[in-house]
Image (cartoon, grey):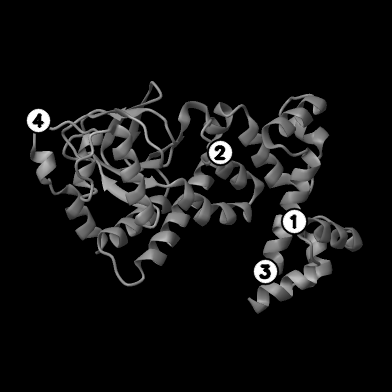
Amino acid sequence: MNPQRLDEYLRKENSYELDKDAVINYSNFSKLVPFIENLDDLDDYKLAYLSAINSANGVIASKQDRFHPVEEHFHDWLELAYMYSGEAHMTISDNPITLKEGECVLINYNTPHSCLACGSNDILINLLISRRYLRANFFDKFSENSFLSKYLMDNLLDENTENGYIYFRSSKNRRLPIFVNEFLCEYYDKGINSADYLSSFATLIFLELADIYKDDSSAAQNNNQIMGILRYIEGNYNTCTLKSTAEFFHLNPNYLSGYIKKNTGKTFKELIQEQRLNLALKLLKNSDLPITEISQQVGYENVSFFYKLFQQTYGTSPAHYREKIKSE
């Protein structure tokens, strides 16, 4: 399926959309999961739907039916609502949100949400993702990235995320619609290698969302400034100190130290070391630079100290790590 055929498919009215008296709730699950039969209990529907998500490699893509409101509900899986076209008026944890074209919202587990009826041009795509799939496919990839991305990933896996959702101001993002469209093209027209393609596109979607959120200054402010602080440390790890970082944010150094520890579980020094070692891992994997040069590039003039720290952190030397990566 190509993007043009995908667009035609999503805009075509289905029989459910033509039923003007329908109301979308859990009793409608059978239209997406045909094997659900004779289930009268709400929890039974949830369990059956979660089973369907897991059996579908952990992700189900669903176009929200237009012309009908979606009643308030919550569930045991993560939901990424992406506005393919038009706009949608949602309420999540009693907070009204107008989702515009290209924007998306990540709704956490067991978070109540609803949506007003969408018009003919309002195409809302829901990616329903199991917790197991998220951990298996994304956690390692994010943890190998920056500590800021890992912090975001930890938040996605935390049921206690403030308000139960993360709103992404992604309307002007270039790559996100490409990744989502390619995912949907493969999802609705599966080939031999669809499972690998879908996993790869899903990873790209979440990596892009992490970048969007990292660069959203208002999101950082809404998250008690920790996102802005982590972004600053990540961008200035080779030169910043606790004092200079505190001055940048007009904070007392002792307060900043405790604030970072409280929100990340790590000290300022540990964050700096983690960022340097993350870069060292990437250089060892993707370059042939001498280890002494890598040590200097990541901010360690004392190569012996770099070797010692690397050994303590990863249980192997930089040279053995590089050999292992090449052999694999």
| Residue density around tag 1, few if under 14, some if 14–19, many if 20 or more, within 10 Å | many
Q: Is residue 114 above or below residue 37?
A: above
Q: Secondary structure at mark 4?
A: loop
The residue most toward the top is: 94
Q: Is residue 288 visible?
A: no
Q: In the drawing, does residue 16 fall left or right of residue 60?
A: left
Q: Is residue 303 visible?
A: yes
* Three-letter amino acid code of the residue under disc 2: Asn
Residue 19 drawn at (x, y percent):
8, 37
- Mark 2 vs 3, N-terminal side: 2
Residue 284 drawn at (x, y percent):
71, 68
- Residue under circle 4? 21
Q: Is residue 144 above or below residue 149?
A: below
Picture quarter with the C terminus: bottom right
319 or 159, which is in the foreground? Answer: 159
Q: Would you say the residues marked 3 and 4 are in contact, meaning their CB atoms lie under 8 Å apart? A: no
* Three-letter amino acid code of the residue under disc 4: Asp
Q: CA distance from mark 2 to mark 3?
A: 28 Å
Q: Residue at x 41, y 66 (%)?
A: 196
- Residue under circle 2? 155
Q: In the drawing, does residue 141 fall left or right of residue 106?
A: right
Which one is in front in this view, the residue at disc 2 or the one at disc 3? 2
Q: Residue at x 20, y 30 (%)?
A: 117
- Mark 1 vs 2, N-terminal side: 2
